[in-house]
Every structure is written in C-alpha cells, then in structure tokens.
Image (spheres, rainbow, N blue to C red):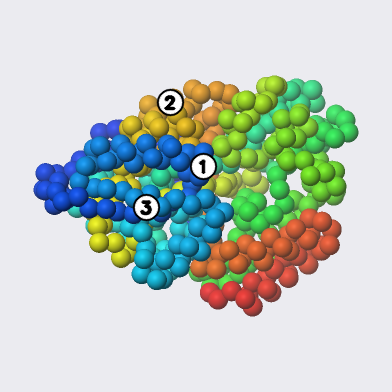
Amino acid sequence: MRKVIKIGIATVVLVSMMCLPVFSAGQAEKAAKPITIRYANFSAGEHNAETLKKMVDLFRQKNPEINVELESMGYGDNYWTSLVTRIAGGDAPDAFELNMEQFLAFTLRGSTRDLEDLFVSTGVSKDIFGEGLLDAVSFNGKVMAIPQSFSTVVLVYNKALFDKAGVAYPTADWTWDDSLAAAKKISALGPDIWGMYNPIQFWEFYKVVQQNGGSLMTADGKGFTINSPQNLKTLQYMLDRVWKHHVMPNKEEQANRPEGDMFVDGKLGMWLNGVWAFTDLKNRVTFPWGIEVEPGNTAKATHFFGNVAAISRTTKYPEETFRFITFLASDPDVVQLRLDAQWELPTIGDPTVMERYLKDTPPDNKIAVLNSLQYAVKPPALLQFSELADIVNTKIEMARDGVLTAKEALDQAQAEATAKIKL
C-alpha cells in the first residue's frame, strides 16, 4: 500500500542542531581497532565524486577507527543489477545507496537492515530529520534507511509570457482548470509558443492520477487499478492538452527539442521540473521566472525524489556503518559541502541550512520547494516495480502518439500487468 508523505514545513525547517548524534566513550572503545566498511553508491557520478570523497575524508578525520571504501558506479552503469547479484552471492557492501523506487524493492527482498535498534545503541536522535523524511524510508513501521538528500518537482513558469498574456501568476491553490485556462491564453500569443509542458509517460502518470483521487493498485496491494475511472479521466486530461486544447506540443511540433531548451528560449509558459534544474536556469534564462507548488485537481500530489543509504542485513559492523551513513546526512561540514556543490538538498532539519537555501535566488519563491513536500507521494511498493513501469509507459506512449485511445491504453496495461506481475 502506498502512503502519502505529509511533511509540515515547520517540521522540515525548525529542528535544532542540538539533535546531532553524540557517541559515548564506550562506543569509541568498541571501535578502537580500525575496521573497514564498504559503501556502494551511484548519485555522486563524475560531477560530485570529489565532493563525496571530501565527505568521506571528513568522516575519517573525526572517526579514525573506521576506514571507508567507496564503491562508486554511475546510475546507468548496471548499478542495480550489480548490487542484486552481489547481495545474492553473499558479497553485499556494508551500506549501499538507493533511490526511492529501488529502496522499496530492496526492502521487499529483505536486503536491508532494520535501523530501529541502532538509533538507540548509537544515541542518534530521529529528530535530526523531519518526521516525513523518516516516514519516506520506513516500512511496516520501522526505519529501514537514512535519507541522504531529496528533491521535489514544482511548477516553473515564465513571468514574461504571463505578463504578455495578461494572466496572473500561479498561486499555491491553483487547480488543473486554472493552469489550463492560463495555458490557453499563453498559447494564443503566437506560433510555437506553448502554455505548458509536462511529459506524457509513466512517471508523470502515476503522480497525476493521485491528483485526481486515483491510484495504480488497490489499498491492500492485492490488485491493479490502472484502468479505473479516475485514471481514465486523468490520462484523457493529459492527452487533451496536446490534441484538444493544443497548449502543449505533440512529438512532431517539439521536433526533438529538449523541453528545458524550449523553456530557456521563451517557448513555454509553464514547465514541471525538479529543483535540480534551478542552477541551469539561473545560468541560461534571461527573462524573469518563478516557481509554485504544482496544481492538482481533487487533491495535490507531487514527486518526492530521495536518495537513501541502507545497511546490509549481513554486515558485520552495523553500528560503525550506521555512524557513517548518519554522518553523511547530518554532519554540519558535510551538509555545507552538499550545499556548496548544489547536490540536491540535505535532509538535516537545521533552520540555518534552509535559510541559506531559500535566500539563494532566483527563483524568489523557493519556499514552494519545501511546501510541496506536504503533497509528496511514493511509487507503489512493488517488487516488480520496474516491470510495471515498462508496461504502463509503453501503453501511455502509444496513446500519446495517437496509436491507442486512453481507454485502450489503460485496459491493455491493466490486463498485461495482471497477467505478468505477481502480487
């Protein structure tokens, strides 16, 4: 069963740094002999590899009794296949990085260790993290990983096009109808000017259906609801923006142009994207732009992207590994390194950290990033999640390209998922 992550803004920004971990002398004695732990990771990539190394160096300086071996791979370098193979073969690293989708899959496989007792034995307070962030990494009521970084998706908009069309800027209570009305006026400004853009594919669909009271699975997780009336209405709405209202380009009209380039070139009035795009937009956009919480319909829902560190169920050094992954998330010097590198957002609840982030403009309404956490949703907790994504995405893209109707696409996806995926 999926659970909506509700994170109050006060929870995220008002936690004191007094909650940072404190380790006892007894624990230091226990780790007197240098030991080595292995950390498999993917998110640093080439761009942040040096930053990650600096983080580990800081840990070694403050914890000389623990060596850390980094086992780094890129996201697209068969990281997940390699990790599954190693765990199955009895060669699991002590800790490994997961994104939210894979966190659920690896937890369902029984590959991750319950961390509840380690909070107690190490003295690390759960209050370091916002309640909602720990909820995101909990399963059956137990914390199963430490959140390392997070990002959300927001509505990015071109203020110049809004002004030219005589449309008021988006607000936090906007609905689908509000955004569509604005998109129509912006699209009327001229050829190759589009009111909005967000892709028609699985990742967008599983979120948007929740804005309309839908879901992909039953509440008990024992059946699929891909072709429910709410979901059919949702997909039809997504398709109508292209084929009926013509406020979003079709495949031919987009002509292989990345949507980010279209926004930078002043071709898009509204664009749904993650906070990771801010740096690029600050460097390239020449017109005024802003952000707001994504509009919803019967409810609001937005993507929560998080990278987490889990501990292997078979590690010989659970406490030392736990100290390392909490250090990566909460040490003030490490947090500053992450902020300086603009490597997503840290999960620590220190108010001064968030103040620095909010004051770094443009955009000038960055509080929307934190407010959007109130509406963050997790993907389905499903062992064969990747297979479900492939099935649904294939059918949705066929509807996008006019090969199938919305009903045909969802009916076929429902039948195929039911036949191929074991619940």
State whether residue 299 is above or below residue 421.
above
* Distance from Cα at disc 1 to Cα at disc 2: 28 Å
Question: What's the residue at 38%, 49% (across, down)?
Answer: 70
Tell me the SS state at disc 3.
strand
Between disc 1 and disc 2, the foreground one is 1
| Residue 346, position as x, y percentages in the image | 42, 38
User: Which residue position holds label 3?
Assistant: 39
Tell me the SS state at disc 2.
helix
Comparing 272 with 73, the one in front is 73
| Residue 42, position as x, y percentages in the image | 48, 50
Q: Which mark is residue 355?
A: 2
Q: Which mark is residue 380?
A: none
Relative side of 281 to 410, left or right: left
Say which quarter of the image contains residue 293: top right
Badge 1 or badge 3: first in the primary sequence: 3
Question: What's the residue at 66%, 26% (across, down)?
Answer: 284
User: Which residue position holds label 1?
Assistant: 46
Comparing 315 with 16, the one in front is 315
